[in-house]
Amino acid sequence: MHFRFGFLSYEISHVIRQRFNKNAESIGITHSQWRVLVHLSENPNCRQVDLAEILDVKPITLVKQLDQLEALSLVSRLKDSDDRRAYRLELTENALPVMQKLWDIADQVEAEVFGVLSPDEQALVTRLLCRVKRAICGTQSDIP
């Protein structure tokens, strides 16, 4: 087993995504789509191009995810009044109960993954990872 941070963090993230996807299969949402919903809930009425930048994905990748979410009536695209070539994005009312189910799944997966750690260790790992994220992203967010 490799013990470098980058390798370990990728492997752990991969397992988390797999477990999330398996548990969310009945809802019909993938981890990637859930990421879109979460970031859209934090950035309402944003343009597609801005959301792609926030998610660090290519716009064409986001379009495919948005098409799927729109087909599920979870996201709506609205023409941008300032730029007729652009769309603004909003969560629909249908998205809120689905997102709650997805948060429950995420909590369950996190409990499974973090279950080997004590509550104090879990809090410490979370704080340290948030510090690393802030440092590499250059943000001063309100993450603990």
Image (spheres, grey):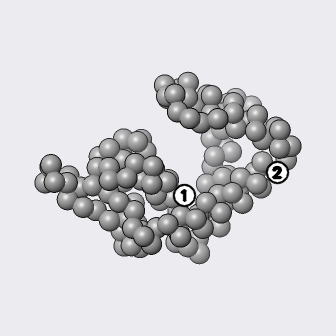
Residue 68 visible: no
Question: Does dot 2 land on a helix, a strand or a loop?
Answer: loop
Residue type, label 2: Gly
- Give the Cα separation between the discs numbered 2 and 1: 21 Å
- Foreground of the two, 143 or 4: 143
Q: Is residue 42 visible?
A: yes
Residue drawn at the location 49% of the way across and 66% of the way down: 96
Position of residue 94 measured from the top left corner of the image (x, y, whole percent): 45, 72
Circle 1 Cα neighbour tier, 10 Å, few/some/many (<14 / 14–19 / ≥20): some
Marker disc for residue 31: 1
The vertical placement of 120 against 48, above or below, is above
Comes first in the chain, label 2 or label 1: 1
Tell me the quarter of the image containing the N terminus: top right
Which one is in front, 39 or 6? 39
Residue 144: quarter of image: top right
Q: Residue at x 35, y 60 (%)?
A: 90
52 with respect to 130 (left or right) = left
Image position of 96 with respect to 110: above or below:
below
Q: Position of residue 49 (x, y in %)?
A: 29, 46
Circle number at residue 115:
2
Q: Position of residue 74 (x, y in %)?
A: 41, 68
Q: Position of residue 3 (x, y in %)?
A: 74, 31
